[in-house]
C-alpha cells in the first residue's frame, strides 16, 4: 500500500534515514515546521508503517563477522508451503542478513555473514544440507564492499510527489 506523502514527509524520511537520533528541534528547523508538527508527522509515519523501525548499524568486522556471502538457493519443490518453510527457516537464522524470494534461476538469494569459512560451512549444514527440499545452492564470497546502503529513495519521481 502506498501512503500519500508530501514533500515535507519525504524530506523528514530522508533526514531520519541519515540519522534517526536527530532531535525534533533539529528536524523542525530543517523542514521549517514546529517541533510539535514534526512530532505529529513522525508519529503518523510510524503508525502507517512507513517507518518500520530504527536500528544501529554495526561494523561486521568489528564484531568478528568479517566474511559476507551471497547465496543463490534453488528449491526442489516450489509449493507455497515449501517456500514458506524455507522463508521461515532463513528468517530465524541470525547470520542471514537479507533474504529475497526471486524469479530466475534461484528461488532465494541470501546475504549471509560468518566469522570464517568454517563458520559458513556450519551454516550451510543447518540451512541447506539438512533440508531435503534444497536442490542446490551457489555461494559467492564478497571480496570487498564497494557500496552498501539501506536507505530508501523517497523522491524517485516528481509525478509521485504530492505538494
Image (cartoon, rainbow, N blue to C red):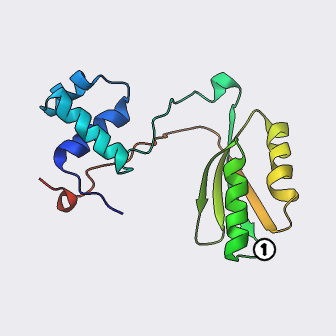
x then y, percent, for residue 112 = 68, 45
**Residue 56 against residue 157 in the figure, above or below:** above
x then y, percent, for residue 17 = 36, 36
Q: Is residue 18 visible?
A: yes
Q: Nearer the viewer, residue 22 or 125?
A: 22
Side of 121 where 8 appears, left or right? left
Q: Nearer the viewer, residue 85 or 160?
A: 85
Which residue appears at 79% of the width and 65% of the height?
136
Where the N terminus falls, by quadrant? bottom left
Which residue appears at 52% of the width and 30% of the height?
57
Which of the 4 image quarters holds residue 23?
Answer: top left
**Residue 40 against residue 134 in the figure, above or below:** above
* Residue bearing mark 1: 76
Side of 102 where 38 appears, left or right? left
Q: How many neighbours does mark 1 have within 10 angstroms: few (below 14), some (14-19), or many (20 or more)?
A: few
Disc 1 element? loop
Which residue appears at 19% of the width and 27% of the height?
35
**Residue 88 against residue 74 in the figure, above or below:** above
Which of the 4 image quarters holds residue 109?
Answer: bottom right
Q: Is residue 70 visible?
A: no
Amino acid at each position: 500500500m502506498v501512503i500519500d506523502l508530501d514533500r515535507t514527509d519525504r524530506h523528514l524520511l530522508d533526514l531520519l534515514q541519515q540519522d534517526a537520533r536527530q532531535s525534533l528541534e533539529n528536524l523542525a528547523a530543517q523542514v521549517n515546521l514546529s517541533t510539535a508538527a514534526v512530532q505529529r508527522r513522525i508519529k503518523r509515519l510510524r503508525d502507517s508503517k512507513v517507518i518500520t523501525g530504527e536500528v544501529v548499524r554495526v561494523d561486521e568486522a568489528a564484531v568478528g563477522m568479517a566474511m559476507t556471502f551471497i547465496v543463490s538457493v534453488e528449491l526442489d519443490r516450489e509449493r507455497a508451503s515449501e517456500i514458506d518453510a524455507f522463508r521461515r527457516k532463513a528468517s530465524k537464522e541470525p547470520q542471514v542478513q537479507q533474504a529475497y524470494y526471486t524469479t530466475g534461476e534461484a528461488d532465494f538469494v541470501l546475504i549471509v555473514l560468518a566469522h570464517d569459512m568454517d563458520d559458513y560451512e556450519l551454516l550451510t549444514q543447518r540451512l541447506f544440507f539438512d533440508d531435503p527440499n534444497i536442490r542446490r545452492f551457489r555461494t559467492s564470497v564478497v571480496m570487498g564492499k564497494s557500496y552498501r546502503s539501506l536507505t530508501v529513495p523517497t523522491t524517485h519521481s516528481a509525478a509521485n510527489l504530492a505538494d
